[in-house]
Image (cartoon, helix red, strand yellow):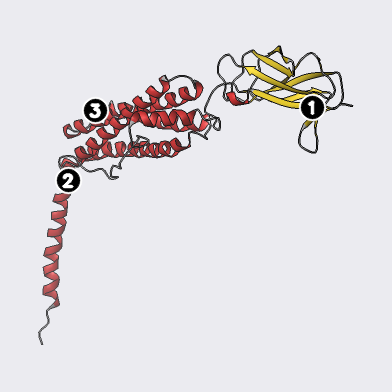
Amino acid sequence: MVFDPPRRRRAWRWLVPLILLAASVAALLASGAGGDAREEIAYLNEMSEQIEEIALGGDALREVIPRLNSIDRPEWLAVIDDLRANITAGLQFAEQEPPAEELFAVRSLYRLALQDWSDGVGGLGTGVLAAADNPNQTAPVDSVANAIVLLRAGDSLFDDLLDEIDRLEVRDPIVPFRDVTLAPAEGEAVTLAVSYALAARSPDNGLSLRPGLAASQLVADPEWQLDPEDQVVMPATDQVAFSVVISNLGNLTSAEEQLVLTFTDAEGSIELTATIPPLQPGAQTTVAFEPLPISPGETYEVAAEILVSDIDSNFEDNRIQVLFRVNPE
């Protein structure tokens, strides 16, 4: 039997150097052309990381939009400010010259999309707050509608950017670009803007920066009570003095306002007026009126109403009234 291991080992001794030589040549070739490639990939990776943050901000925006009727102002501002900060960082990056001619179109589309997004997010943020702060104005609806159009334009430009990235001439980043949608919803822009404005003006949220005067309590002296039939009754007396507890339930200091007390009996009505001093948010004050004559056995109605001269978070709580009967003895 003939067996010749040394010959096999000699064959491998020739093959291994050839493999090492080929690897060395490939490495040298790669190093010669790799500088530009590394710069292009690094450029695209930076852009991809920025896009990831912007996309997350878009997700947060679409999550908060359906809750406009219940959120507070700080939550809304946090979402808008975070998104705007990430877009601003992208705009600063887009001012840099790309490392390769093939990336100029990518940079241009990115910058255009960012600019539309920036204007759209800014317009949406201020428009929603303007709608909340100025419930009787229609201009905020136009602002929100324009913002939606701009956000959609930015989304469309970004889709064009993704198409440009897919071209063979452009190197792929290590982290692929993800889709970005900042437009809050589908549908006609004006219709959406009206719905957002109505939600922003809901009395159940804390979006508005405005006072919220409320006639919280109507107090009588002597004190009235409820009888077994849930009717308001007052002990027999020949006069009564009313006072009204006023609260500022809003988030802005109120202006000086007027409070009107209307006292009605079988013969007609009497109106008394008093001044409500400015109130800090969360503060209360009691406004007292001069005593009024009444007769035992008679029925009366008393109402107190705040005459708000400007803005208020909820006009429905500006009035309070009580129908009461005076006991005959």
Examine the rendered structure and indicate whether residue 206 appears above or below residue 162: above
Label located before the other in sequence (2 or 3) = 2
In the image, taking residue 147 as reference, residue 232 lies left or right, namely right
Q: How packed is label 1: few (under 14 Cα within 10 Å), some, or many (20 or more)?
A: some
Label located before the other in sequence (1 or 2) = 2
Residue that sits furthest to the front in the current view? 267
Amino acid residing under circle 2 = Ala
Which quarter of the picture shows residue 305? top right
Residue 46 position in % (x across, y down)? 31, 37
In the image, taking residue 94 as reference, residue 206 lies left or right, namely right
Q: CA distance from mark 2 to mark 3?
A: 24 Å
Q: Circle 3 sits in a helix, a strand or a loop, which is it?
A: loop
Q: Which residue is mark 2?
A: 30
Q: Does residue 214 show up?
A: no
Amino acid residing under circle 3 = Glu
Task: Identify which residue is drawn at 47% across, 31% down.
Answer: 199
Q: Which residue is mark 1?
A: 325
Examine the rendered structure and indicate whether residue 179 appears above or below residue 218: below
Q: Which residue is mark 3?
A: 97
Q: Does residue 139 show up?
A: yes
Amino acid residing under circle 1 = Arg
